[in-house]
């Protein structure tokens, strides 16, 4: 299948490679020429503008967008809306808010164009393993992309989950669960690391738990790899970013009166990681000193 591809970051470029490996004809665009060069080396046709990309595709056109969530996605979707025609389809494979995806789908429908919101999971390992794809949109439109989904995903790794917005809603909750899983592993290994008298071998424990344990997982396999490289993670600063989905997941839980304390706490722990000196912790230490005379550690 011939498809346009917008966005050639690490994940997007790997997706182009996987598509090329299966014989798909790719017209690729990224703003920087240096980002386009690797795609060209893979056999993709590269262009320097969205106008050129649209010109290189035959109707009905299919364009996959893989750019950062937020303004970059909004600008790209708007520009494509002006360039594409009736019967063409855009697939947003980034981490857009599902409400934005539903809005954009209605906007595209005004010109009888298709819009698919496709939650994409797999990270940098997707090139080798495949990407888990969860997508929303009209059935007759998503069915046209079956060859692309089949190439990008492993067996049983893609699913039409519902109408527009549902794909990114499911991906949002996927990432919300990921927040909680990461936090649970982090807390467990922090306790193991703190038990100094046992001199525990953290890489060996991670490997052990991956052999039939009920807590085995791909995340734990990645933890094992990370710990083998740096057993006490001394080279890494404990600063954890969030890309938005955890916030959205917590907000949805609040809006629907659904209890989700673990996901919410995992989100707030990420905020805590960004504080070199937490005022809140200083506040607690000061109060303990005031009411109980508990010792406080002074800054040097």
Image: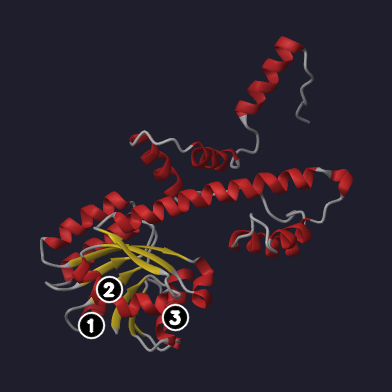
Residue at image mark 2: 63
What is the CA distance from the residue labelled 1 to the residue labelled 3? 20 Å
Residue at image mark 1: 57
Q: Earlier in the sequence, mark 1 or mark 3?
A: 3
Q: Position of residue 258 (x, y in %)?
A: 39, 36
Task: Return the mark for residue 221.
Answer: none
Task: Give whichever of 226, 47 is nearer the camera.
Answer: 226
Disc 2 crowd, CA 10 A, few/some/many (<14, 14-19, 20+): many
Q: Can residue 230 be seen from the camera position used here?
A: no
Task: Name the front one of labels 1 and 3.
Answer: 3
Q: At 10% from the left edge and 65% from the top edge, which residue is drawn?
A: 111
Residue at image mark 3: 18
Task: Give whichever of 292, 181 is nearer the camera.
Answer: 181
Q: Earlier in the sequence, mark 3 or mark 2?
A: 3
For the residues bearing labels 1 and 2, Cβ distance under 8 angstroms: yes
Q: At 41% from the left edge and 85% from the top edge, which residue is drawn?
A: 20
Q: Position of residue 277 (x, y in %)?
A: 65, 34
The picture quadrant where one finds residue 158 is: bottom left
Q: Position of residue 120 (x, y in %)?
A: 41, 64
Q: Secondary structure at mark 3?
A: helix
Q: At 64% from the left edge and 50% from the top edge, which residue is drawn?
A: 185
């Amino acid at each position: 299948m011939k498809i346009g591809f917008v966005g050639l970051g690490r994940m997007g470029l790997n997706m182009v490679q996987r598509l090329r490996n299966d014989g798909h004809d790719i017209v690729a665009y990224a703003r920087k020429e240096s980002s386009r060069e690797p795609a060209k080396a893979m056999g993709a046709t590269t262009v320097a503008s969205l106008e050129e990309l649209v010109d290189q595709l035959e109707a009905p056109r299919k364009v996959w967008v893989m750019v950062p969530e937020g303004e970059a996605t909004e600008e790209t979707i708007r520009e494509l809306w002006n360039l594409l025609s009736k019967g063409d389809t855009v697939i947003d494979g980034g981490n857009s808010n599902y409400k934005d995806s539903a809005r954009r789908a209605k906007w595209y429908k005004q010109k009888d164009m298709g819009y698919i919101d496709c939650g994409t999971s797999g990270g940098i390992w997707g090139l080798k393993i495949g990407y888990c794809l969860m997508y929303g949109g009209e059935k007759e439109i998503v069915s046209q992309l079956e060859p692309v989904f089949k190439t990008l995903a492993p067996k049983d790794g893609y699913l039409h989950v519902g109408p527009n917005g549902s794909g990114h809603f499911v991906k949002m909750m996927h990432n919300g669960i990921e927040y909680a899983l990461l936090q649970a592993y982090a807390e467990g290994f922090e306790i193991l690391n703190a038990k100094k008298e046992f001199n525990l071998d953290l890489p060996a424990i991670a490997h052990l738990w991956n052999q039939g344990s009920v807590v085995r997982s791909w995340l734990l396999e990645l933890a094992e790899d990370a710990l083998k490289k740096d057993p006490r993670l001394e080279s890494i600063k404990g600063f954890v970013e969030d890309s938005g989905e955890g916030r959205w997941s917590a907000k949805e839980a609040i809006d629907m009166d659904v209890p989700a304390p673990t996901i919410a706490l995992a989100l707030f722990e990420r905020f805590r990681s960004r504080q070199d000196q937490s005022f809140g912790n200083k506040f607690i230490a000061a109060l303990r000193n005031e009411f109980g005379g508990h010792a406080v550690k002074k800054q040097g």
